[in-house]
């Protein structure tokens, strides 16, 4: 395995080689780990709830439609027209209506700079989330911090961390760097964004996005294998949520969903005008993995953010036609998992990154 170091950072496919001990890499981060928010979060997929979410600062992608841009793009001055609230994730079963969502989420005008966090501090934060009733530890945008997170997880597991650890990333990963996390991560949840290199270059500055994501997903699956579910060990865990699955699901439609203990849970956000690209990704997933061995979370929540004058095609939400076309292909190919109501594009569940607290709750 490559000897990864922040002195010449190659933790992601940007391969920038920056000395992050004295400057910053493509991700705009140096060597000091920064956490924007830690919370008991109800805005993730039902099989992860309640999630002990830790939102890290920085990102190796620069998606023009990013909903968390003020922490993912800390050097960005985005502003202007558009909605600064983030969409919630309301998931549905075959025969239910979306449940009410409550919580904070309005983005303020000021963003407080997060303080550096040591590996021992991060380990203590994981244990605190476990103590507060989290069913999973949800690492949000962890890619720039693989070395520090590896250290923290090693410490936390020795001190009693037993919850499934979720690696919640943008899919643009180095397969070799992911091997650093083998045995520490239980659930990989990549947001598989594009099949088209033209789209990935235009909107995320990464023409090689799909090639690298394909390598990464294969490595993720190699590490964690087919999906496994079990009862939550979280304190105060309520009734399991329901999962809308494909017709051939062995669990059947409407069965209560336990917590995912192991496996690959692939998210995909359908973008305006790119439903054909999304359909190709459904085919890719079904052709690459046995459909029943992974889970798909198909998102309809796209909401225009900030100033998108250069990308007028993104200044609208997706249509029912676009989403239904992708849903249809996912169902045809036997991809089981979660489907989102189109009215889920609201501000309600978006974390507020301006209040500076590491431990808050969105319920």
Image (cartoon, grey):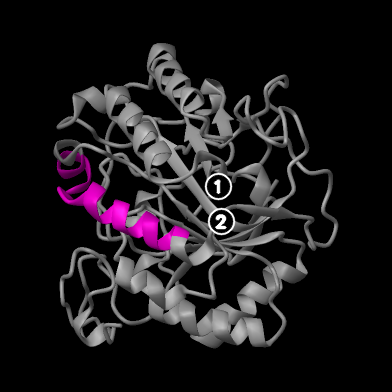
Disc on the earlier residue, 1 or 2: 2
Quick one: quadrant of the N terminus?
A: bottom left
Which stretch is magenta? 200-221
C-alpha gap between disc 1 and disc 2: 8 Å
Looking at the picture, tell me which residue is in the foreground, 119 or 9.
9
Q: Which mark is residue 293?
A: 1
Q: Is residue 253 visible?
A: yes
Which quadrant of the structure image shows residue 326?
top left
Label 2: which residue?
263
Which quadrant of the structure image shows residue 156?
bottom right
213 inside magenta stretch: yes
Above or below 350: residue 232:
below
Q: Are marks 1 and 2 in contact (CB under 8 Å)?
A: yes
Please name the residue shown 64% across and 64% down the image.
Answer: 164
Which quadrant of the structure image shows residue 337?
top right
Q: Is residue 50 visible?
A: no
Please name the residue shown 72% across and 69% down the image.
Answer: 130
Query: Picture coordinates of residue 165 (x, y %)?
Result: 59, 66
Please name the residue shown 38% across and 22% down the image.
Answer: 317
Instruction: Describe the element under mark 2 as helix, strand or loop.
Output: strand
168 inside magenta stretch: no
Query: Picture coordinates of residue 335 (x, y %)?
Result: 51, 34
Q: Which mark is residue 166?
A: none
Position of 28 with respect to 39 (left or right) is left
Position of 4 with respect to 44 (left or right) is left
Q: Pointer 1: residues within 10 angstroms few (<14), some, or many (20+)? A: some
Considering every residue shown, the one lying at the far top of the view is: 321
Looking at the picture, tell me which residue is in the foreground, 334 or 44.
334
Instruction: Describe the element under mark 1 as helix, strand or loop.
Output: helix
Please name the residue shown 80% across and 63% down the image.
Answer: 233
Mostly what secondary structure, the magenta segment? helix
């Amino acid at each position: 395995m490559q000897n990864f170091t922040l002195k010449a950072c190659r933790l992601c496919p940007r391969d920038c080689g920056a000395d992050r001990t004295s400057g910053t890499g493509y991700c705009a981060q140096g060597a000091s780990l920064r956490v924007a928010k830690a919370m008991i979060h109800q805005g993730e997929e039902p099989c992860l709830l309640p999630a002990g979410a830790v939102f890290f600062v920085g990102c190796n992608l620069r998606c023009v439609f990013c909903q968390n841009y003020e922490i993912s793009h800390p050097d960005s001055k985005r502003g202007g027209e558009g909605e600064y609230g983030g969409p919630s994730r309301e998931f549905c079963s075959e025969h239910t209506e979306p449940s009410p969502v409550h919580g904070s989420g309005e983005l303020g005008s000021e963003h407080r700079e997060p303080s550096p966090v040591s590996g021992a501090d991060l380990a203590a934060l994981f244990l605190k989330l476990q103590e507060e009733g989290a069913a999973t530890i949800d690492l949000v945008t962890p890619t720039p911090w693989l070395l520090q997170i590896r250290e923290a997880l090693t410490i936390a597991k020795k001190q009693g961390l037993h919850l499934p650890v979720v690696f919640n990333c943008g899919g643009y990963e180095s397969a070799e760097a992911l091997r650093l996390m083998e045995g520490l991560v239980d659930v990989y949840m990549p947001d598989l964004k594009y099949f088209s290199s033209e789209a990935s270059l235009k909107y995320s500055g990464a023409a090689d996005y799909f090639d690298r994501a394909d390598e990464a997903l294969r490595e993720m699956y190699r590490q964690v294998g087919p999906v496994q579910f079990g009862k939550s060990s979280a304190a105060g865990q309520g009734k399991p949520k329901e999962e809308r699955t494909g017709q051939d699901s062995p669990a059947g439609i409407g069965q209560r969903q336990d917590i995912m203990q192991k496996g690959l849970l692939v998210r995909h956000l359908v973008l305006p005008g790119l439903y054909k690209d999304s359909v190709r990704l459904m085919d890719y997933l079904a052709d690459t993995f046995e459909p029943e061995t992974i889970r798909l979370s198909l998102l309809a929540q796209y909401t225009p953010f900030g100033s998108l004058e250069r990308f007028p095609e993104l200044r609208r939400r997706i249509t029912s036609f676009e989403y239904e076309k992708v849903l249809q292909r996912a169902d045809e190919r036997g991809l089981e998992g979660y489907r989102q109501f189109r009215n889920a594009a609201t501000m309600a569940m978006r974390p507020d990154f301006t209040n500076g607290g590491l431990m808050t709750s969105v319920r």
